[in-house]
Amino acid sequence: MNKRVLGSLARIADFDTRPFEMQAIPRSDWQTGDFVRGIVTGEPTRLYHIECTTGEMIAVDPGDEVIGAFGHRAATLEGVGSWMEIDGGEMNAMTSAGLFGRFTSVSRLLPRPMNLQYAGHVLRSGRKVCMRDFALSAVPRELDLPVILMVGTSMSAGKTMTGKFACQILSGLGYRVIGTKLTGAGRYRDILSFRDHGAAEIYDFVDAGLPSTVVPEDEFRTAIRPLLGHIASRDADFMVVEAGASPLEPYNGAAAIDELGANVRCCILCATDPYAVVGVQKAYGLRPDLVAGPATNTSAALDLVEKLTGLPGINIIDPDELPVFREFLVHILQIEDAATRAPRSA
């Protein structure tokens, strides 16, 4: 029997509790963020898995139904595509979260992506249901929360890994941390790892009604400001923020950094190699406080980072280096160590 799976982009919606209909609508009415149904087609590969609304990965087979959303993707290491490229209803799951579109460029290092056939929009009372219908809203409020920001030289540069350990260290010191991913393509697992490592609350651009942040800059800023306003209203000591991809890619990373403004107290550049650190510094004018990621995997890499940039680096995936990372955060944020700080009261 075929099954229906809600992709994690639908986690902000109420599809589990309220009925809805399905109906094909004219192509001229399609938009980014529309919730749609796709029927799985093709011969399954290891990419025939959907991340459901809880973050669990579920295998899907031909004939299964997936609820996802139209969007755009421009990943340097995996694939590029858009719902605007869908032809004849044939589309791909561009991420496991149910980001639907059609790839125009895919890395040959990956298995064949999941194929689907468009099978209608999600409707209620004849009106299509969109991600923006469920976006967080908030009274305008200035963000006044110290931010630890992870930016990268590309995707898969170690940003999420670094962020989750920052959450773990700061929460272990007794601080209340909010974990956030402001740019990227919709997946739930990244911010779930922040929660699993001590973040008291987690948010991302999906909560702002965006399937990915490959959208016009004004649209991104309009969507993200209520999310930042909501976070500002929460009782927290620090916000650990991941900016997916790099500031130079079309994910609005530079705009996200601008929105955070002077709240950024620590910037960590996660890099794929030492030369990429130089590239981002020169292209974007960014001078981070620390380098992490694969560019710090060995002592030779660390030496090269320092030689090329003069920046310190920490190999955060090495358990023996976590105390060093902890000391770095305590120093740069000018906070108390666990030995001298009383636990935060409930």
Image: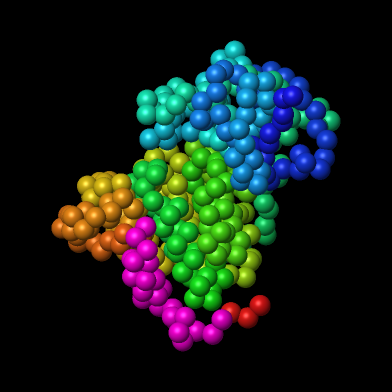
Residue located farthest toward the top when viewing the structure as drawn: 88
Residue drawn at x 84%, y 30% is 125
x then y, percent, for residue 189: 55, 47
Q: Is residue 249 visible?
A: yes
- Residue 99 higher or lower than 294, as above or below: above
- Residue 104 higher or lower than 317, as above or below: above
Residue drawn at x 37%, y 25% is 108
x then y, percent, for residue 313: 28, 61
Tell me the quadrant of the picture where the C terminus can be found: bottom right
- Residue 174 higher or lower than 253, as above or below: below
Q: Quadrant of residue 10?
A: top right
Q: Is residue 193 left or right of residue 74?
A: right
Residue drawn at x 71%, y 22% is 120
Q: Which residues are magenta?
A: 317-343
Q: How is the image coloured?
A: rainbow
**Residue 240 painted magenta:** no
x then y, percent, for residue 179: 54, 59
Of residue 289 and residue 91, the one placed in the foreground of this image is 91
